[in-house]
Amino acid sequence: MRITSGHLKGRTLRVPSAGVRPSQDRLRQSLFSSLGGRLDGWRVLDLFAGSGALGLEAWSRGAEEVVWIEHEPRVFSVLHENVRTLCGAHIDSRARCIRGDALQLARWGRTLATFDLVLADPPYDVVLDEDVLQKLLEGLPAAGLIRPNGYFACEMRAGETPPIAPGWELRRTRKVGGSQWALYRRLSEIESEMRDPKRHDD
C-alpha cells in the first residue's frame, strides 16, 4: 500500500497482519481528489485509523495537523511506526497517534480541538451492527470536533446507503471495487435553520 499523492507520494506503508482492511489506493485517491487535492493548513482527524493510510494521505497533501485514533494494541503499534517513519520529527506534536475508542466522541471533544476534516474507515461488520456512521454524524458536531463547513468522509461496503442526519449535506459518493466512500459537509448554523422543515417564519 502506497501514498498516492503529495510530498510522500509513492512511500509505502506497513499493514497490520490481521483484523484490518486497508483502504484501497484508488479509493483514497478519488476521495482526496474530490476535496480539491491539497489540504494546506487543514486539521484532520482519522478515526478507526488502522495503518494510518487516510491520515497520512492528508499529511502528504499539506495538512497542518493530523490526529489518528486506533483501539487495537497490535494495530496501534503498526500505525505508530508508519506515522513515525513518514512524519519524522513532527510525531507527537503535529502528527499524533492516540490509542483509544474512536466512538468516545465526548472524550475526544474535551481533549482535542475542532477539525476541518474527519475521516472514518471502521470495519464493515461494525458499521452494520452498531450503526457507527449515524453515531458519528450525530456525535461529531455535539462533541465540537467538526467546524461549520468542515467535511466528514467515511468508507463503507459498496451498495450500502449512506445515512442522513440533520445539519449535514451529503456531497458525493463514489464506488471503487467492493467499497465506496461518502463525503459530507457540515452545514453552517444559518444553513441548518434554512433547511429545517420545523422552522417557522414570524
Image: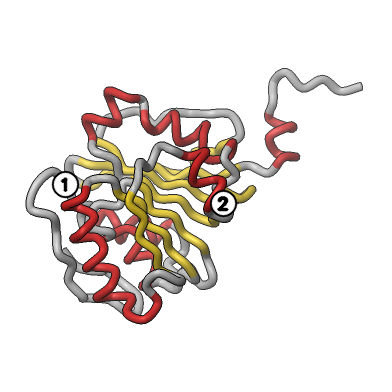
Q: Name, please, the residue furthest toward the right.
A: 202
Mark number for residue 66? none
**Amino acid under disc 2:** Gly
Identify which residue is drawn at 74% across, 32% down: 194
What's the colour scheme? secondary structure
**Amino acid under disc 1:** Val
Tell me the CA gap for discs 2 and 1.
27 Å
The residue nearer to you, when weighing 180 against 72, is 72
The quarter of the picture where the C terminus appears is top right
Image coordinates for residue 162, horizontal then vertical, percent: 39, 31
Identify which residue is drawn at 30% across, 31% down: 127
Determine which residue is flagged by label 1: 20
Image coordinates for residue 25, horizontal then vertical, percent: 22, 59
The quarter of the picture where the N terminus appears is bottom left
The vertical placement of 77 against 163, above or below, is below
- Determine which quarter of the picture holds residue 189: top right
Determine which residue is flagged by label 2: 150
**What secondary structure is found at the residue carrying circle 1?**
loop
Identify which residue is drawn at 24% across, 75% down: 85
Relative to residue 21, is residue 113 drawn left or right? right
Image coordinates for residue 118, horizontal then vertical, percent: 45, 50
Relative to residue 7, is residue 116 drawn left or right? right
Residue 174 in view in this figure: no
